Amino acid sequence: MSGNGLIHSIRRLLNTEEQLRRPSPFNELRQQMSDVLGDGGILKELVQAGDGPPVPYNASVLMHYSGYLEYSNVPFETNTYQRFPKIMKLGRDVTLTGLEMGLLTMKKGEFSRFLFEPQYAYGDLGCPPLIPAFSVVLYEVHILDFLDSGQVDDFTAMSQDEQNTAPLSNLLEVVNTVRSFGNRCFNQSRYHDAKDHYKEAVALLGNREKQSDVEREKLNKALLPLYLNLSVTELRLERPHKALKYGNKALEINSGNTKALFRCGQAYMELQEYQTAQECLISAQAKRPFDSDINNLLRKVAMCHKDNLDKEKNMCSKMFRHMREK
């Protein structure tokens, strides 16, 4: 062995010994983490603080997360590549014990790291082939938002009689939460899911046995935005007939509602009923004369209507010319 080869071997041996003396990555991380439960099974490092109350039990959470094994820079699971991650319900979609318990310590906007011992992660068996037995895992979690769906679960589990006797305020809170789920799905372009949430909220309101004029007014006030949401969702799903149905339901509650008139105008245009579309949009324009969306759509409908009339005129002209030639 040459002198240079011997020196290289000695250096490699010294480096190996130094690495053995140095704490492992997870052990180094443990030094700066707090013990969530007091048994060392769930350790947490707060990287970025959040705002407001912590995530409640039975919440549905919108989050980015990545899970790592020690000595690996590549996550064994992650959803950070998704711009709009799926809403996950605790206890149903979030099934890792440590992760669920860790989430309950977090707030909206918070970014934290967690170390989970095997009993709070994948246990004695692991999850072959990705996760070996008895693995300690690291999770990085960023809470984007959450909704308290526990109240929704409790309310929908009631019988119809129990729902009817529950305070109206409880029903309206539940409906508002379900609508928020729909809005979240709509903003993520998940229109079928949004429609289902909006229809669920409409059904909850429709099942309520109306007890007074005041209560009926409150129920209609809650129904109006749901019909408007359903109308625009059906337009995104390219189903103008259904969009028109919900737009008209909104107009039954408030005949002068500008959004409802606009939605009906959009639906009639898609159905190529340009004259009726113009009537709806002109009514909306009378209430909001400087609304650019209304004015732009009105001009578009007028152009489509003119083109349609010109096509009909040309078709009739050709038909009559053909008859004269005979």
Image: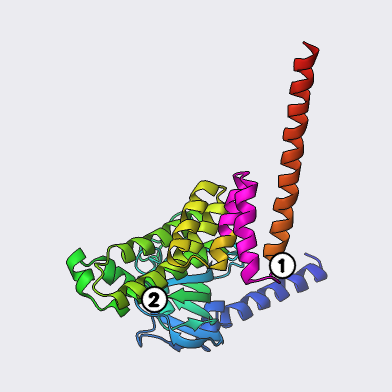
Residue in the image at 58% along x and 51% along y: 267
Marked residue nearer the N-terminal end (2 or 1): 2
Q: Based on the picture, tell me whether residue 14 belongs to the magenta stretch.
A: no
User: Which region is colored magenta?
Assistant: 263-292
Q: Does residue 285 appear to the left or right of 21 in the view shown? A: right
Q: Is residue 268 magenta?
A: yes
- The percent coordinates of residue 261 (x first, y second) are 56, 61
- Image coordinates of residue 174 in percent, x first then y, are 35, 73
Q: Is residue 58 left or right of residue 116?
A: left
Q: Position of residue 3 (x, y in %)?
A: 81, 71
Distance between the Cα atoms at labels 2 and 1? 37 Å
Residue 162 is at least partly visible in this image: yes
Q: Residue at x 74, y 22 (%)?
A: 319
Determine which of the numbered discs, if any, sits on residue 148 in the image: 2
The 10 Å Cα crowd at callout 2, few under 14, some 14 to 19, many 20 or more, is: some
Q: Amino acid at mark 1?
A: Ser
Q: Is residue 20 above or below residue 66?
A: below
Say which quarter of the image contains residue 324.
top right
SS label for mark 1: helix
Tag 2: amino acid: Asp
Residue sitting farthest toward the top: 326
Residue positioned 36% across, 64% down in the render: 92
Q: In terms of depth relative to the viewer, which is nearer, 146 or 160?
A: 160
The residue that disc 1 covers is 292
The tally of labels here is 2
Where is the N terminus found, in terms of image quarters?
bottom right
